[in-house]
């Protein structure tokens, strides 16, 4: 292949699937290196925005609106104690703390993110309400039934074991508590159907850039939730609502501040920025979905029949 093609293959090429330990190290390193640049350009919320109307340009407010709209959709009227699973630098946690005057705990694999989250909580006068720590979402350091709101915003796609992930969400949730998962998924498949080879190649390139394991569908999540006896399971595809965000991020990566920051942040951050184009391609083809899922934990254990 030509030199540019070889470089592109190195940047986004197909490689063997990473092990669980490789994913953990990669995720921590990726966010340690990229989080400061993201905050410099986009602020404290490390997630998509709510683009209604779709031509809005107040991107930071769109990110805040996404949190509020998801909470409204999930019918969360109050909160005593919440856990933010895959918390980034804690933007969602601090927003929840202010909105509901509640206590929040955040977990992330990135030492930089945990430290920055606690620093921002102190700066914003929320040190007594918000706490962040380095921990594995598949083995959270919390007692059973600790939280009445379990919040996972764009972290489920990083989980190599979706069964264990959902199990942990249920374990730390109080009976009758609310579980909310907002995550990237692939399209639903008919019985016996598989993704096409082209679709698998596209997801593989995205996985290399963002340190992701294999994807699942929104319907897969619904089955997992129902398997735990979840009540009031709801799901909705908001792909069309967040799609303009990818274009906005791509545009922002082209300004001088972002280009300089990307160069300083290193290869994996540059690869992650370029992969936004692949995310957009996947959305346009109908492969990639932005799924919202919510349910309540049953107040009694499901019977085994």
Image (cartoon, grey):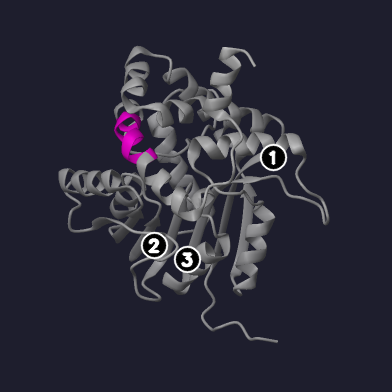
Residue range of the region highlighted in magenta in the rendering: 30-39
Residue 230: which quarter of the image?
A: bottom right
Q: CA distance from mark 2 to mark 3?
A: 19 Å
At a point 59% along the width and 73% down the height, the residue shown is 228
Q: Position of residue 163 (x, y in %)?
A: 57, 65
Residue 244 visible in the picture: no
- Residue at 33% x, 65% y is 81
Q: Which mark is residue 200?
A: 1
Callout 3 secondary element: helix
Q: Which residue is mark 3?
A: 169
x%, y% of residue 266?
36, 27
Q: Which label's residue is closer to the chain start, 2 or 1?
A: 2
Secondary element under disc 2, as helix, strand or loop, is loop
Camera-side residue: 254 or 198? Answer: 198
User: Main SS of the magenta segment?
Assistant: helix
Relative depth, front residue between 127 and 56: 127
Label 1, label 3: how far apart the Cα atoms are: 28 Å
Mark 3 burial class by Cα count in 10 Å: few <14, some 14-19, many 20+? many
């Amino acid at each position: 292949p030509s030199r540019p093609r070889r470089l592109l293959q190195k940047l986004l090429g197909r490689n063997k699937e990473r092990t669980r330990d490789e994913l953990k190290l990669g995720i921590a390193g990726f966010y340690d290196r990229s989080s400061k640049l993201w905050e410099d350009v986009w602020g404290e919320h490390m997630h998509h925005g709510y683009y209604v109307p779709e031509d809005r340009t107040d991107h930071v407010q769109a990110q805040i609106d996404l949190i509020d709209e998801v909470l409204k959709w999930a019918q969360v009227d109050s909160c005593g104690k919440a856990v933010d699973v895959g918390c980034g630098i804690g933007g969602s946690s601090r927003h929840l703390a202010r909105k509901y005057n509640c206590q929040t705990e955040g977990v992330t694999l990135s030492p930089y993110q945990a430290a920055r989250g606690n620093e921002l909580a102190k700066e914003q006068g929320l040190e007594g309400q918000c706490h962040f720590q380095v921990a594995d979402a598949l083995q959270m350091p919390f007692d059973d039934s600790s939280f009445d709101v379990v919040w996972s915003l764009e972290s489920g796609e990083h989980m190599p074991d979706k069964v264990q992930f959902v199990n942990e969400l249920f374990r730390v949730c109080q009976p009758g508590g609310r579980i909310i998962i907002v995550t990237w998924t692939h399209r639903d498949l008919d019985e016996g159907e598989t993704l096409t080879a082209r679709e698998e190649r596209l997801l593989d390139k995205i996985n290399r850039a963002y340190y992701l394991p294999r994807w699942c569908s929104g319907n897969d999540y619904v089955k997992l939730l129902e398997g735990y006896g979840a009540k009031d399971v709801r799901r909705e595809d908001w792909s069309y609502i967040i799609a303009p965000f990818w274009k906005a991020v791509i545009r922002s990566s082209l300004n001088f501040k972002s280009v300089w920051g990307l160069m300083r942040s290193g290869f994996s951050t540059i690869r992650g920025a370029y992969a936004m184009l692949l995310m957009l391609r996947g959305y346009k083809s109908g492969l990639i979905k932005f799924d919202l899922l919510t349910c309540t934990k049953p107040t009694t254990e499901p019977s085994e029949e």
